[in-house]
Amino acid sequence: MTVISSASLLSIASLFRPIRKYPTLPDLVITATSIRCLLSLSQPMDDRQQPESKKRVVVCGGGIIGVCTAYFLAKKGAAVTLIAKSSVACAASGKAGGFLALDWCDGGPVESLARASFNLHRSLSEELNGPDLYGYRPLTSLSITVTESGPSSPSGSKSSGDSTIPSWVDGPTRGPRTIGTTQTTAQVHPQLFTRTLLNTAVKKYGVEVVIGKLEQLHVEEWRVGSVVLEEGRVIESDSVVLSLGPWTGKFEMLASMFGVSGLKAHSIVLEPKDPGAITPHALFLSFPPQGGKAMDPEVYPRPNGEVYICGMSAEEEVPDDPEQIVGNPASIAMLKRVGKSVSSHLREGEARVKAEQACFLPCTDDGVPIIGEVPGMKGCYVATGHSCWGILNGPATGAAVAELVLEGRATIVDLSRFSPARFVGRRRVKV
């Protein structure tokens, strides 16, 4: 557990680990206002003076779901403490692609959530200066088949004359199709988005941040009363929101009710020598590698000149420490093969490898997020299991949970289909 005090201002910076420098996106600034808010953590929560009208809510989880929930709770007037196990947005919320789609979830259980959240992303971008602070922009999305180029293949060997394909995609391609327009698809840099939102919540709405590991909840007469951290600190609360991502399955109380596992996803970030040549087109590929099974990688150019490539996943045990997650060498190597096959701008010698990384996506037993009050435990809420759509659905999830906690029901989206009550009877509940 980290305690922020006036004697140790360096610990404030540890809440926001250094962000890779963006040529066009300024780093976040923690102002004197946020420092004053953070310094108040040196006092136990129950010793601080809180207006009687403010509901005390503890949000456990420093990823996009937890941060969005904390932001909207505080904006609606709650006294919010956010507990993060490690640095904010250090796992999937910092290493995801940040792709947003209005209608790609239509016909499924998250359709209304996705549509509401896509529109909320646009509103937040206007409110928070998203284009400058975290790379929000609409973009065109294409589906393309790319054939792996051999070691002696020349640059500029594009096999399709279709003008749909941007000029920088000069590898062997076929079958291009537009699957998203600037009206229906967009992107953010997920780590910068998450940290921008939290920085605003701290400065503007008084959210307090604690770095520590959740140990247990204190429950009396089937109502949550406080949160206990690993080193023994007790934080009193009126409500608790558990947004633990793939670590949900490691928290015994929730693991006894439903299953949330982690899918390990790999990605690389490239920095081309000529970033100006890369246009805002998200690529969803069919890629049959030489001597291997066809796969479906994705390529997202970012407005700062980086190019993000992902597509290799595997089922593995989720480690306890999110900071210790590393990519599998074979998966990283395959993503580099994808990059050089897509574009000569992404080949070795033409692009610097800025990051080789992996993260775990939280997946539920039935493939549907779990959002709502925990059955039989008043004041305890859960929000997890968003799989690959966590960045898209974070804002609407946070806004809906804030309404549920403070007003008793969500209006931005109907949460009934996501309720954890759907698992009652499937597993034995332990408290």
Image: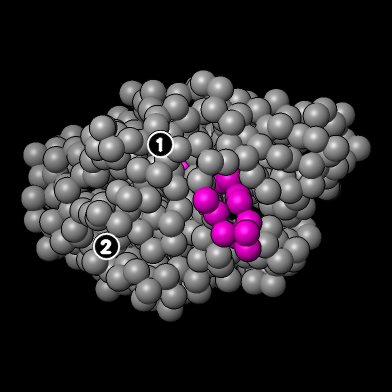
* Residue appearing at x 60%, y 50% in the figure: 57
Image coordinates of residue 125 in percent, x first then y, are: 37, 71
Q: In screen coordinates, is 328 left or right of 378?
A: left
Mark 2, secondary structure of its residue = helix
Q: Amino acid at mark 1?
A: Ser
Q: In screen coordinates, is 250 left or right of 212?
A: right
Between 311 and 358, the one nearer to me in the picture: 358
* Residue appearing at x 37%, y 50% in the figure: 37
Q: Which residues are magenta?
A: 49-65
Let me know if residue 278 appears in the view.
yes
Of pointers 1 and 2, the one earlier in the residue sequence: 1
Q: In the rendered picture of this protein, how many numbered marks are placed on residues?
A: 2
Let me know if residue 344 appears in the view.
no
* Residue 140 falls in image quadrant: bottom left
Between 225 and 355, the one nearer to me in the picture: 225
* Residue 267 falls in image quadrant: top left
Q: Quadrant of the C terminus?
A: top right
- Residue occupied by mark 2: 133
Q: Amino acid at mark 2?
A: Leu
- Answer above or below: position of 163 versus 239: below
Q: CA distance from mark 1 to mark 2?
A: 30 Å
- Residue occupied by mark 1: 42
Between 92 and 43, the one nearer to me in the picture: 43
Q: Is residue 57 magenta?
A: yes
